[in-house]
Amino acid sequence: MQLSKSEEQLMEVIWQHGTVFMKDLIDASPDPKPASTTVATLLKRMQEKGFVGYTLFGNSRQYYALVSKEDYFSKHVRNIIKNFFGNSVAQFASFFTNTADLSKEEFEDLKR
């Protein structure tokens, strides 16, 4: 399952803070701030997709990630390798090292 760009932005805040209330997500958003109804809709979709859970505190919900950032992005990388590089990690690594603007030191680090 994949997140939309807007959902990814909210997840980034959740991953950074661990637990957040809707107000925290709105405050962390760039201007113009999204409406609370928009954020609520995104959170509901993210719940349905299995990315976030929440704990009730009175009438407020404190949201937390059900999927780690590492797991989410490693799945994306695996899909890219599968779909664009014939499931070959070597082809992906070759493409990445040839197209990325790596310093000699960074390249040597990758080789290790």
Image (cartoon, helix red, strand yellow):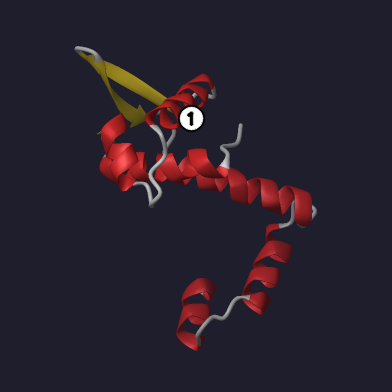
Left or right: residue 63 compared with residue 91 = left
Residue beneath label 1, please? 42
The residue type indicated by label 1 comes to Leu
Residue drawn at x 38%, y 22% is 53
Q: Is residue 62 above or below residue 23?
A: above
Q: Position of residue 7 (x, y in %)?
A: 50, 38
Disc 1: CA contacts within 10 A as few (<14), some (14-19) or many (>=20):
some
- Give SS at disc 1: helix
Q: For this rendering, which residue is in front, 77 or 52? A: 52
Q: Position of residue 43 (x, y in %)?
A: 44, 27
Q: For this rendering, which residue is in front, 62 or 18? A: 62
Q: Is residue 32 above or below residue 20?
A: below
State how many labels appear.
1
Q: Is residue 21 visible?
A: no
Q: Which residue is most to the right?
A: 86
Image quadrant occupied by the N terminus: top right
Q: For this rendering, which residue is in front, 87 or 17? A: 17
Q: Which residue is most to the bottom?
A: 104
Q: Position of residue 29 (x, y in %)?
A: 37, 47
Q: Position of residue 95 (x, y in %)?
A: 70, 70
The quadrant in which residue 18 appears is top left
Residue drawn at x 47%, y 79% is 106
Residue drawn at x 67%, y 78% is 98
Q: Which residue is most to the left?
A: 58
Left or right: residue 90 compared with residue 12 = right
Left or right: residue 22 compared with residue 84 = left
Q: Is residue 42 visible?
A: yes
The quadrant in which residue 11 appears is top left
